[in-house]
Amino acid sequence: MSAILEVRNLKKHYPIRKGFFAKQVGAVKAVDGITLSVEKGETLAVVGESGCGKSTTGRAILRLIEPTGGEILFDGTDVRSLDTEQLRRFRTDMQMVFQDPYASLDPRWTVQRILEEPLRTHAAAKNRELKSRVEELMQVVGLSPYQAHRFPHEFSGGQRQRIGIARALALNPKFIVCDEPVSALDVSIQAQVLNLMQDLQEQYGLTYMFISHDLSVVKFISDRVAVMYLGRIVELAPTKELFAKPLHPYTQALMSAVPVPNPGLKKSRIVLTGDVPNPETPPSGCAFHPRCPFAMDKCRKDEPVLRPLDSGHQVSCHLY
């Protein structure tokens, strides 16, 4: 397999300004040096607590927000070097499915117009081709073409997310960032949307970056998992291996919090003490050391790096 996306030392810092002249006095380090690659046709999941930088990472990769530093290589092209017009043309290959299927759709537009918009913007279809392409997209995501004249509020949450997926597919992209696409849906609808995404991936050869905090969903859909904490990746491994043998103490705590659908089975829970540190002033050394039950003096001084272990497993921890 070959990498369709390579991210090296990606950073996104939001400046903190104060005073009459808005002088910068600090920065919120939302993403602080991420390095990863995504292979063609795979699903890489990014998991972690709320506020760890998952969504910011996805948006920075697509340049929906401008990164502060780092490299983003997509099919060998340096995404950060593209000007406005080049980036607009490049959008056909990289798309996004947003978390809230209602907020991401214009309530004043019909589904027909919503799905026509990317086709018109990129001159991918004209006149009669537009209608037939919209009908095709509706059918692909399991909706009836006659529903295209309706507005978003006339659909259920699952149907609205299907419309969001159809819009992302309109330009035949190679890579889609899915930002918690099923977190706002009922469990039964989640399964339908996840199955749909897997079918579309197989049918069109899509590559996904799947951002989520739901580990059961991640286990079902992903090939590899990257665990984030305070803007950094602390563990990266194939899904089966990560769930069978999590190495980083933070990953172990996340896994122990997953509910088991068996009332008679007792599960030992790892409860982390303290709160997530402020990304404006992250701790020295390992960012996780204030909450880690295995913290050593070295953890407080030296920042660990993401080291490769056996079978593609990588971990950022001084214990290894």
Image: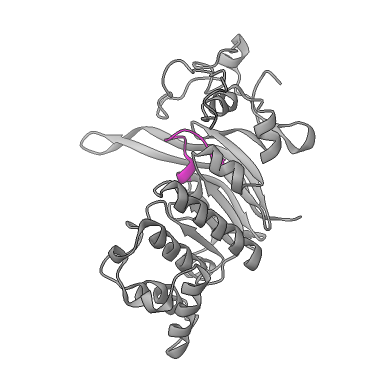
Examine the rendered structure and indicate whether residue 316 appears above or below residue 34: above
Residue 170 placement (x, y as % from top left): 50, 72
Magenta segment, which residues?
Answer: 46-56
| Residue displayed at 71% across by 21% down | 320
Image quarter for residue 198?
A: bottom right
Residue 236 is left or right of residue 187, and the answer is right
| Residue displayed at 44% across by 83% down | 130
Question: Observer-nearest residue: 233 or 68?
Answer: 233
Magenta region includes residue 307: no
Residue 51 is left or right of residue 172, and the answer is left
Query: Which quarter of the rendered picture does the N terminus lie within?
Result: bottom right
Residue 159 placement (x, y as % from top left): 40, 62
Q: Residue furthest right?
A: 310
Image quarter for residue 150?
A: bottom left
Magenta region includes residue 52: yes
Examine the rendered structure and indicate whether residue 107 appears above or below residue 237: below
Q: Residue furthest top?
A: 297
Residue 16 is left or right of residue 87, and the answer is left
Residue 148 placement (x, y as % from top left): 37, 76
